[in-house]
Amino acid sequence: MNQTNPGRLDPNGRVMMISGANRGIGAAIAHRLRLEGYHLSLAARRPDDIPEALGDDCMHHPFDALDPESPRIWADATAARFGRIDGLVNNAGTAAAFGFEDGDEADLDRMLEVNVKAPYRLIRAALPHLRVSGSGRIVTITSLAGMRFKRGSPGYAISKFAAMGLSSAARSLLWEDGIRVTAVGPGPVNTDVVAMVLAMPNNASVAAVPINAVYEPLP
Ligand SMILES: NC(=O)c1ccc[n+]([C@@H]2O[C@H](COP(=O)([O-])OP(=O)(O)OC[C@H]3O[C@@H](n4cnc5c(N)ncnc54)[C@H](OP(=O)(O)O)[C@@H]3O)[C@@H](O)[C@H]2O)c1
């Protein structure tokens, strides 16, 4: 347990994998978790683009969500480097804007591949190590678009609703292994919340965090 923050898990020595850590929300989460003292396995299509400085407690690795082998290769490399995996942040995502009467179905397939199937494969790849951890954590960055539909791209919403389903299934099925699973659904962007749920002990867990900037009812 964390001595300075009783009730929170001690980040020191815990290993977190973050996909899409080269920019945007992923880079911000990586920066925040590094300040907390986690060991980080940061992945991106072009790992040289990852801004967090390399140190003994941080590795950079290639990850392409469109390659079905990539999740296993990255998880194996993380376990080989650190000897453990305590958490996974499924952050990499893609959006293509088109409606029901325009667009290309290949764009829908790509969103499903990157936003749903890659996180599914990453959970499978990290799972044996998260089980050994006893307090494994999985955060999937979904979207408010995956919690209700207001406007925008139906295909993106479909992929993010599916990512919510993935998170919900993992939360239920992995609970007895001490693994806690949270879907974080940004509208505007907030990264502190990811650090917060990663550090919550097994007996205090949050299923989903919708981040709204304005009032709106959610189902
Ligand atoms: N920003 C928002 O307002 C917002 C709102 C709701 C949800 N989200 C979600 O939050 C997450 C991060 O969003 P962001 O705003 O930080 O987006 P971003 O700046 O566009 O970054 C997306 C990240 O995903 C990576 N990525 C895309 N396709 C990939 C692939 N095939 N393989 C590996 N990595 C891939 C990108 O890598 P490259 O640099 O190589 O392209 C990049 O690292 C996404 O899941 C997004 O859907 C964002």
Image (cartoon, rainbow, N blue to C red):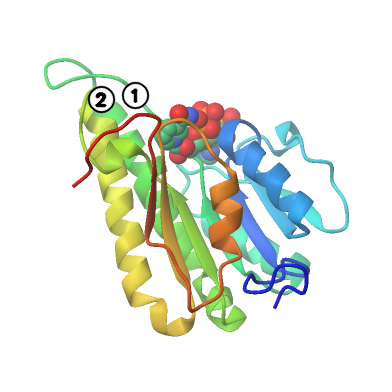
Q: Residue at x 17, y 15 (%)?
A: 102
Marks 2 and 1, how far apart at CA:
7 Å
Q: Tell whether 106 sits left or right of 8.
A: left
Dot 1 lies on which element? loop
Amino acid type of the residue tagged 2 in the rendering:
Ser
User: Which residue occupies the foreground of this view, 34 or 204?
Assistant: 204
Q: Decide: few, some or many residues near mark 2? Use Cα within 10 Å; few <14, some 14-19, many ≥20.
A: some
Q: Residue at x 38, y 28 (%)?
A: 95
Q: Tell whether 2 sits left or right of 201.
A: right
Q: How far across and down, in percent of the image, does residue 110 sit?
A: 35, 35
Amino acid type of the residue tagged 1 in the rendering:
Ala
Is residue 69 shown above or below 64?
below
Q: How far across and down, in percent of the image, does residue 208 sit?
A: 37, 55
Residue for badge 1: 96
- Asked whether disc 2 touches disc 1, contact meaning CB atoms under 8 Å apart, the reply is yes
Eye-nearest disc, 2 or 1: 2
User: Which residue occupies the foreground of this view, 48 or 70?
Assistant: 48
Sequence-wise, the earlier of marks 2 and 1 is 1
User: Which residue occupies the foreground of this view, 178 or 132?
Assistant: 178
Q: Decide: few, some or many residues near mark 1? Use Cα within 10 Å; few <14, some 14-19, many ≥20.
A: some
Q: How far across and down, in percent of the image, does residue 30 sit?
A: 68, 45
Q: Tell whether 108 sits left or right of 29.
A: left
Q: Quadrant of residue 105?
A: top left
Residue for badge 2: 153
Is residue 123 shown above or below 58?
below
Q: How far across and down, in percent of the image, does residue 189 sit?
A: 51, 33
**Quarter of the figure with the N terminus:** bottom right
Asked whether mark 1 lies closer than 8 Å to ligand 1, one says no
Q: Tell whether 106 sits left or right of 128.
A: left
Residue 216 is marked as none
Whether residue 21 is visible to the viewer of this picture, yes or no, is no
